[in-house]
């Protein structure tokens, strides 16, 4: 988009100045630009200011007005062409942008395929986690059962260890009875 520089006169300002103050502008410009001519003319002869003023004013302003109108038309045409071309891209820039977008699309599709693969892997890991959880529960149950068995066996051991042992004498006594 074209930025407008406020220090530069716009077409409307130029046209207003030309149409509104054309005579004053032309006289001032002509006097300023023709100073050296006036000085040169005054040197050999003594001209009155009035004669010099009329010499400068007698300049026909129609060609200048025509030139300004042509310039304004050119500015209008330039604005139209610039607006029409401001949105266009060069072939190289267009190809570069298309390549960038195509690359981004490929990356997005690649990310989607990677994401799908990761989702499948996550599902498999969830299944494995569930299996491991069930195995842990089963192992915990077996551990409790084994600990109970160990406790029972220890109690039997203690009870057996505390039981009195028959000696040979006791055995003979029992046999006799």
Image (spheres, rainbow, N blue to C red):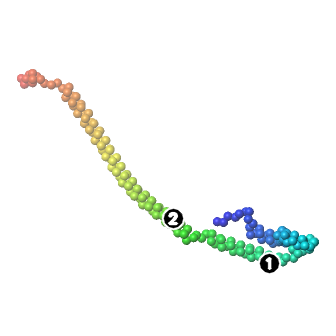
> Which quarter of the picture shows residue 75?
bottom right
Lateral position of residue 142 relative to residue 7, left or right: left
**In the rendered image, which quarter contains the N terminus?**
bottom right
Which is more foreground, mark 1 or mark 2?
1
Residue 107 or residue 3, whichever sits in front: 3
- Secondary structure under tag 2 reads helix
Q: Mark 2 highlights which residue? A: 100
Q: Can I make out residue 177 in this image?
A: no
Please state which of residues 46 and 18 is positioned toward the viewer in this rendering: 46
The residue drawn where x is 12% and y is 23% is 167
Name the residue furthest left: 176
Contact between labelled residues 2 and 1, with CB atoms less than 8 Å apart: no
The quadrant of the picture occupied by the C terminus is top left
- The percent coordinates of residue 107 (x first, y second) are 46, 61
Distance in Å between CA atoms under marks 1 and 2: 54 Å
Residue shown at 33% from the left, 47% from the top: 132
Q: Secondary structure at mark 1?
A: helix
Residue 47 % position (x, y)? 92, 72
- Which residue does the numbered mark 1 point to in the structure image? 63
């Amino acid at each position: 988009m074209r930025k407008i520089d406020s220090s530069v006169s716009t077409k409307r300002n130029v046209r207003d100045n030309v149409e509104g103050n054309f005579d004053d502008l032309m006289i001032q410009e002509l006097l300023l630009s023709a100073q050296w001519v006036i000085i040169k003319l005054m040197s050999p002869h003594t001209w009155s200011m009035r004669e010099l003023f009329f010499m400068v004013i007698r300049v026909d302003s129609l060609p200048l007005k025509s030139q300004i109108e042509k310039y304004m038309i050119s500015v209008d045409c330039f604005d139209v062409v610039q607006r029409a071309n401001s949105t266009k891209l060069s072939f190289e820039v267009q190809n570069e942008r298309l390549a960038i977008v195509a690359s981004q699309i490929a990356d997005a599709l690649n990310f989607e395929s990677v994401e799908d693969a990761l989702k499948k892997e996550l599902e498999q890991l969830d299944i494995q986690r569930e299996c491991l959880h069930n195995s842990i529960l089963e192992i915990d149950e077996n551990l409790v059962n084994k600990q109970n068995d160990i406790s029972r066996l220890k109690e039997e051991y203690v009870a057996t260890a505390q039981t009195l042992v028959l000696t040979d004498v006791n055995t003979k006594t029992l046999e006799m009875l």
